[in-house]
Image (cartoon, rainbow, N blue to C red):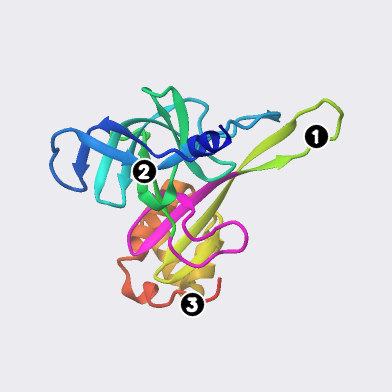
Amino acid sequence: MRKSIISLLFVLFSVTISAFAVGGDEIPKEDVQLMGKIYRFPTGLEGCPYLSIDWQQTSVYLENGKVATDIKGRFDILNNDLIFYNESLKRVFVAEKDFVNSFVLYPGTPDSLFFFKYQGEDVGYRLKNNDFVHALYRGKINFFVKHLADVVRASNVGAKDEIFPKNFYFVQIGDNTYSFKPRYKYVYQIFPKKRKEIRKLISENKIRKATENNLKVLFSLIEKNESIMGAASRSK
């Protein structure tokens, strides 16, 4: 009996869903195997442990080159995990990271969020190799955010521990990854010898406050400028 319970916790499951070759045309429906284990919902917490409280339509790009679509997914910000609801089994599973290349929440909509597995050196305790991160801009410069949360222990008897969501930003250029905040001074720190040229780009293109969208515009301009790109600092 005990062995059966342990086996169930690490079950491998498959569901019949649409599958596509990445970047290709739709192919007939087939079994796409999603590897994972049964998810245990957190208890005794105040706040939402997910990026969104609702289940979201999700497309999952697998390492074998196929795409699983029409999945009910959530992103767990406590554990940096993608979880799925399996309709036929009426159970929630944690996706096995080794088999997932990337995934999209709300695919095909203006609100879509693209997540990929970060590949690179650890940046302090906040970013580890193979962490799922939310891509804001991808090119020669990768600008992304890691969504996570702290749990603060309750100080009063009977009170629940509280969840505090946090966002940590990063910029990756080649083999270098920089801890980042959405402010222009952090752009200058990456290109310390090109402050004047970057300020000129900001002025000429009428880029104002350093919002996520404005930084995406700025990074797209910077990566077209070989002089600036070649001056990226190696310090992090």
Q: Quadrant of residue 221?
A: bottom left
Does the image show residue 72? Answer: yes
State the residue at coordinates (71%, 29%): 44
Q: Which residue is mark 2?
A: 103
- As drawn, the residue found furthest toward the front would be 1
Numbered badge on residue 154: 1
Q: Amino acid at mark 2?
A: Phe
**Which numbered disc, 3 or 2, marks the residue closer to the eye?**
2
Q: Secondary structure at mark 2?
A: strand
Where residue 21 appears, x then y in whole percent?
A: 19, 46
Which range of residues does the magenta coloring cover?
119-148
Say left or right for 22 vs 85: left
Which residue corresponds to mark 3?
193
Q: Locate the N terminus by quadrant.
A: top right
Q: Earlier in the sequence, mark 2 or mark 1?
A: 2
**Mark 3 nearby-residue class (10 Å; few <14, some 14–19, many ≥20):** some
Given the image, on which type of amino acid does mark 1 rest? Ala
Residue type of the residue flagged with mark 3: Lys
Q: Is residue 30 above or below residue 211?
A: above
Give the class, few, some or many, for how many residues have Cα within 10 Å of label 2's Cα (few <14, many ≥20): many
Image quadrant in which the C terminus is located: bottom right
Residue 45 belongs to the span the image colors magenta: no
- Cα distance in 3D space between marks 3 and 1: 47 Å
